[in-house]
Amino acid sequence: MGFSTTHLIIFLVIIVVIFGTKKLRNIGSDLGGAVKGFKDGMKDGNTPAEKTAEAPAPTLVTAEKSDAQSTIDVQAKVKG
């Protein structure tokens, strides 16, 4: 028990009468835009890890206790 060509044509005519061609066109374009956005999102998610990885966090470099005045704060020098 399958659908014949006449069943499909009758079904499409009923859908067009109920919704109208303008509404169906809008639905089609919205659906196409959603699929395109989904595909673009999937492409962005597949970028290599080294491109998306952030730079390592800067570390605090300090001198010995006797040279407390020569302590260097690396984080203060990093711009960003």
Image (spheres, grey):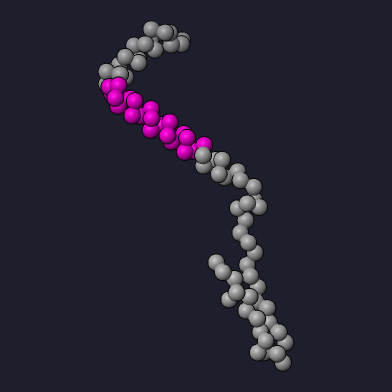
Q: Name above or below for residue 68 compared with residue 27.
A: below
Name the main secondary structure of what is drawn in magenta. helix
Q: Name above or below for residue 28 compared with residue 15.
A: below
Residue at position x 60%, y 53% from top?
Answer: 52
Q: Residue furthest bottom?
A: 66
- Residue range corresponding to the magenta coloring: 19-39
Q: In the depicted view, which residue is nearer to us: 13 or 31?
A: 31
> For this view, does 66 lie left or right of residue 52?
right
Q: Is residue 33 magenta?
A: yes
Q: In the depicted view, which residue is nearer to us: 14 or 48?
A: 48
Q: Position of residue 11 (x, y in %)?
A: 35, 15
Q: Position of residue 14 (x, y in %)?
A: 30, 16
Name the quadrant containing residue 19. top left
> For this view, does 16 lie left or right of residue 58?
left
> For this view, does 22 lie left or right of residue 4?
left
- Mark count: 0
Q: Position of residue 57 (x, y in %)?
A: 63, 67
Q: In the depicted view, which residue is nearer to us: 31 or 70?
A: 70
Name the quadrant containing residue 62. bottom right
Q: Position of residue 60 (x, y in %)?
A: 65, 76
Residue at position x 51%, y 42% from top?
Answer: 41
Query: If the image is split into quadrants, where does the C terminus sit?
Result: bottom right
Residue at position x 42%, y 34% from top?
Answer: 33
Q: Is residue 58 magenta?
A: no
> For this view, does 73 lie left or right of residue 32?
right
Q: Name above or below for residue 13 compared with residue 63.
A: above
Residue at position x 65%, y 81% from top?
Answer: 72
Q: In the depicted view, which residue is nearer to us: 11 or 71?
A: 71
